[in-house]
Amino acid sequence: EIVLTQSPATLSLSPGERATLSCRASQNINHYLAWYQQKPGQAPRLLIYDASRRATGIPARFSGSGSGTDFTLTISSLEPEDFTVYYCQQRYKWPPEYTFGGGTKVEIK
Amino acid sequence: EVHLVESGGGLVQPGGSLRLSCAASGFTFSSYWMSWVRQAPGKGLEWVANIKQDGSEKYYVDSVKGRCTISRDNAKNSLYLQMNSLRAEDTAIYYCASNIVAAGYLDYWGQGTLVTVSS
């Protein structure tokens, strides 16, 4: 089973600052990684897939990078609505296996 | 517009059963893999099961194998999850999700249905 480890667990920043979230895979997953945003009481929303491709309607301030085992989600300038939880997910062994990371919470400093 | 609406959740005793449903609209349901993902209260996301377009392949997370069955009715644009022998640790919001834009990624999600297993 591929394990995804997200860091940090919590990121405290101010609006307008740059956020850098990390996701590390326990083995090489090429570029088969996605990022999701989940706001309280809502379903997750796909932000980035294949490590760096923005999903439809996602603002340009969200970008993804990385390959192999180390991946990064960058939010270039935090908007108030960006303070929430983010998950990474791999599909290297799909089907059938999906794996999610444990999440990073971006909170207001 | 893609729309996924789950139903069927509720309070059930340990050992009981529930059948979750997901009504899909706004896309050609029969053309895409579909999945169930759950989230225990205050916890992260866990993939539960997925099913191929024609239902010929079905996969499950180890913790539900033998207790849950995923199925679909393409004529009704509906996805199902039959859950038996429910345990307290199955308590979660259950989401159905699609793989439309990019295979292997969950691009559209329903609002979820809450399953609570408790005596």
Image (spheres, rainbow, N blue to C red):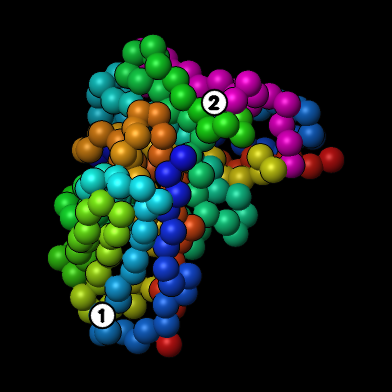
Q: Can residue B22 be seen in this view?
A: no
Q: Nearer the viewer, residue A108 or B78?
A: A108
Quarter assignment of residue B65: top right
For mark 1, does the 10 Å Cα neighbourhood hold few (<14), some (14 to 19), or many (20 or more) residues? Answer: some
Residue at image point 42% right, 68% down: A7
Residue at image point 54% right, 26% down: B81
Identify which amino acid the numbered label 1 is placed on.
Answer: Arg
Does B33 appear above or below A85?
Answer: above
> How many numbered marks have been drawn onto this rendered protein structure?
2
Residue at image point 37% right, 53% down: A25
Q: Report if residue A68 lies within the magenta region.
A: no
- The span from disc 1 to disc 2 (Cα, nearest Å) is 41 Å
Give coordinates of residue A14: x percent, y percent: 35, 87
Does A22 appear above or below A27?
Answer: below
Give coordinates of residue B37: x percent, y percent: 48, 40
For mark 2, does the 10 Å Cα neighbourhood hold few (<14), some (14 to 19), or many (20 or more) residues? Answer: many
Q: What element carries label 1?
A: loop
Give coordinates of residue A85: x percent, y percent: 43, 65
**Residue beneath disc 1:** A18
**Residue beneath disc 2:** B81
Q: Quadrant of the N terminus of chain B?
A: top left
Residues marked 1 and 2 touching at CB (< 8 Å) = no
Quarter assignment of residue A74: bottom left
